[in-house]
Amino acid sequence: MITVVAASQNPVKQLAVREAFSQAFPSQKIKVAGVSVASGVADQPMTDEATLQGAINRARNARALHPNAQFWVGLEGGVDECPVSGMQSFGWMHILSPDREQSCRSASFPLPTAAVKALKAGEELGPVMDQLFHEHNSRQKGGAVGLLTNELVSRKDLYVQPLIFALVPFLHPGRF
């Protein structure tokens, strides 16, 4: 059995971790435990760098809290300005094992003008999107990406692929 600590109590993030690890290690039973830990960055990271740092901090803080797992995973959603397309949202995934760590970023997607204005005024993306789309707690469902793509891509879907990519060095340790 592989024990993974997901540095989040959000069931969507835990499900993404479970799905990615189950796909990467199909012959293993995967146990995912979620924990709430500090990111060490703003509640709404506004740069690529801050978002990555939040994911790293969460994974490391999860390891400090539960040192006996095989893996610790930090997931952090954030936004940043694209010089061509305006503000976009994405997520960083950071995976630790006792002897290795790796980060990968998700695809990014554009944000509506009203959301950008609210984010620049200090609000967080989840509640802003709930207000714009008349939803409740969308961050624990399909997320902003689900709302904006009419559920063609969910928050879980957005996070599974970069989690799998972050696992590449763990799947082929002799090559990295």
Image: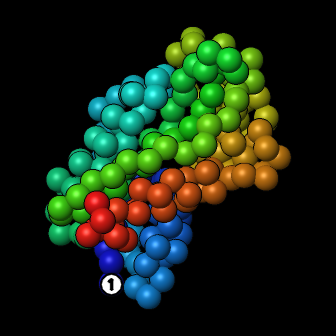
**Which residue occupies 61% across, 21% down?**
82
| Pointer 1 residue | 1
At label 1, which amino acid type do we have?
A: Met
Q: Farthest residue to the bottom: give it.
A: 27
Q: Residue 128, position in %: x, y?
A: 66, 27
As displayed, is residue 56 above or below residue 128?
below
The image shows residue 78 at horizontal and vertical percentages of: 51, 32
Q: Position of residue 169 (x, y in %)?
A: 34, 62
Judge from the rendering whether residue 51 lies leftward or rightward of residue 39; answer left or right: right
Residue at x 67% of width, y 35% of height: 109
Secondary structure type for disc 1: loop
Can see residue 131? yes
Residue nearest the observer in this picture, 17 or 100: 100
Q: Is residue 40 left or right of residue 112?
A: left
Residue pictured at 58% horizontal, 19% vertical: 81
Q: Quadrant of the N terminus?
A: bottom left
